[in-house]
Amino acid sequence: MLITGDNLTVHFLLPMMIKFTNCKSKMKKFVVLFLFSAFMLNSFAQDEIIVAPEKNVLKVNTLALVVGTGSIFYEREVSDLASAQMGVGFMNYNLGDFKFTGLILTPEAKFYIRKNAIDGFYISPYLRYSQYGYKSDEGEDEGKFSSVGGGVAFGRQWIFKKGFVIDFFFGGHYTDGSVDIQQGGEPEDVTKIEGFKTRVGLAVGFAF
């Protein structure tokens, strides 16, 4: 088929523009929701919350449980403006005809806006290392997949009275991986784990 300027616009450019617009609209709604939630919780915090003097936080990402991933974080204050955090996650879910199980490590440095690290708004560059084992439903295909990537997240953490913690964050990272085939072939949907990925979390825990 001869591809003219009109055909290119209709068949290629227009669908891409519509998809980009939809993604941009969804991101706008999420950012607005995040800012609104942060404002409401911050207003409540001014009257009800007493900032805990502890320098350590242990928390669990509740949203990760929805997609079959358990994530736990340990955060340590290292200065008035910064903290270091390590996240450990375990993944167990199905992708197409394959089941993936494995470990996710997420080290990150969190920089807080005001001089009260582990309590407030922050920006957090991070790395992510993942190693999964995969196996097809029929058992004919089996192997391992590992990936390395990095990105940045933005969030707000609150420390309530008696050390109760809420951490709400969102961001994204790019990851690239490789497959070690042990039996059969490579999963057709493995590319869904690679590339740019969003990261959203609502963690709860305690400061000590």
Image (cartoon, grey):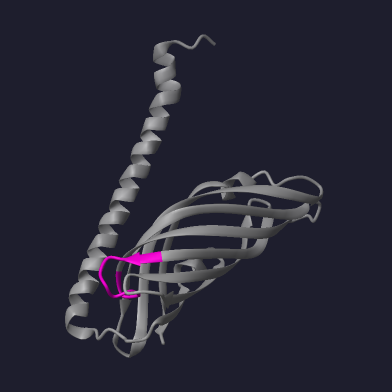
Q: Which residues are magenta?
A: 110-120
Relative to 180, is 34 on the left or the right?
left
In which quadrant of the rendered view does residue 14 lie? Answer: top left
Q: Is residue 157 above or below residue 67?
A: below
In the image, residue 108 sits, relative to residue 115, either above or below, namely above
Q: Main secondary structure of the magenta part?
A: loop
Q: Which residue is at the far bottom?
A: 162
Decide whether residue 78 is among the magenta residues.
no
Name the residue at 66% across, 59% down. 131
> Residue at (26%, 66%) from the top-left corner?
37
Q: How many marks?
A: 0
Of residues 106 and 59, the one drawn nearer to the viewer in this rendering: 106
- Residue 136 drawn above or below residue 103: above
- Residue 19 is left or right of residue 183, and the answer is left
Left/right of residue 21 with respect to residue 94 in the rendered view: left
Please state, as top left, top right, bottom left or bottom right, where the N terminus lies in the image.
top right
Q: Residue 62's quadrant in the figure?
A: bottom left
Residue 206: give x, y in percent of width and height.
Answer: 41, 84
Residue 114 picture location, percent across and down: 25, 69
**In the rendering, at what x and y percent does residue 184 appear?**
81, 47
Which image quadrant: the C terminus?
bottom left
> x%, y% of residue 24?
33, 43
* Residue under the point 34% across and 49% down: 27
Say which of 22 and 196 sits in front: 196
Residue pictured at 32% horizontal, 55% vertical: 30
